């Protein structure tokens, strides 16, 4: 694997860490400072020709110009969209979307089995449902990390297949519908951009591992 591809995959992992964290925890002023004020989201570590990615980058660059106001609006949006104590207009849970699409489907058990097959344990799994998008994205980064450590061609080929299988079955199967809900119900450009970024990143990774 060449240097450029390694850096590209690491860049996507950084974006998935960021976007996943914004779904797990209510945003704070420190979070806004770290990601927006310092300019990290104006200079993304990845460039992509995917129109969805370009749209996400544009939305994120245009968002959050005032730290305090942005923090407050993000916290309100988080509660309305994702929090169990809020309206939950776009819950970041695959079970809700997959059950609508496939009667009698058991997404939580299925994704749990995928985690367990790799012996993956995380404190996030203790605090959140296994089918929470933040958990699913973190696991995807672990699969990519594992791929980056391989130096054997047959193993790399098999790992590519596993990553594509995971993305296809546990992310692309519902994230597009979830993203549509975020676009409809989010008040902040920030969360519209984050949802679009997640959708674009998993599309790009699916293509990169083909």
Image: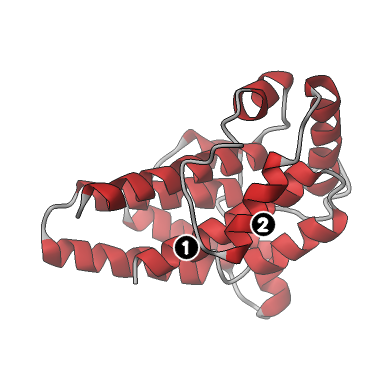
User: Is residue 144 visible from the viewing direction of this image?
Assistant: yes
18 on left or right of 193: left
Residue at image position (55%, 37%) is 43
User: Is residue 110 visible from the viewing direction of this image?
Assistant: no
Which residue position holds label 2? Answer: 55
Which marked residue is nearer to the observer: mark 2 or mark 1?
2
Mark 2, secondary structure of its residue: helix
Mark 1, secondary structure of its residue: helix
**Mark 2 closeness class: few <14, some 14–19, many ≥20 residues within 10 Å:** some
Location of residue 40 by image quarter: top right
The disc at residue 204 is 1
Question: Viewer-proximal residue, 112 or 138?
Answer: 138
Residue at image position (66%, 42%) is 23
Residue at image position (65%, 78%) is 104
Question: Viewer-proximal residue, 115 or 146?
Answer: 146
Question: Viewer-proximal residue, 149 or 9?
Answer: 9
**Above or below, 164 relative to 69:** below
Where is residue 144 drawn, in percent x and y? 34, 51
Q: CA distance from mark 2 to mark 1?
A: 14 Å
Where is residue 59 drawn, in percent x and y? 72, 48
The disc at residue 15 is none
Question: Viewer-proximal residue, 137 or 52?
Answer: 52
Q: Quadrant of the C terminus?
A: bottom left
């Amino acid at each position: 694997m060449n240097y450029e591809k390694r850096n590209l995959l690491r860049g996507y992992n950084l974006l998935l860490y960021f976007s996943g964290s914004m779904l797990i925890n209510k945003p704070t002023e420190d979070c806004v400072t770290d990601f927006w004020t310092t300019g990290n989201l104006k200079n993304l570590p990845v460039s992509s020709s995917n129109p969805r990615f370009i749209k996400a980058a544009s939305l994120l660059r245009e968002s959050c110009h005032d730290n305090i106001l942005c923090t407050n609006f993000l916290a309100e949006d988080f509660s309305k969209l994702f929090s169990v104590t809020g309206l939950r207009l776009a819950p970041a849970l695959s079970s809700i979307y997959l059950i609508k699409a496939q009667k009698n489907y058991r997404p939580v058990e299925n994704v749990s089995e995928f985690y367990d097959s790799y012996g993956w344990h995380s404190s996030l799994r203790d605090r959140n449902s296994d089918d929470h998008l933040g958990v699913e994205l973190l696991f995807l980064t672990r699969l990519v990390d594992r791929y980056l450590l391989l130096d054997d061609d047959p193993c790399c080929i098999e790992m590519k297949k596993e990553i594509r299988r995971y993305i296809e079955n546990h992310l692309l199967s519902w994230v597009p519908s979830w993203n549509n809900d975020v676009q409809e119900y989010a008040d902040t450009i920030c969360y519209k951009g984050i949802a679009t970024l997640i959708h674009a990143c998993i599309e790009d990774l699916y293509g990169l591992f083909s």
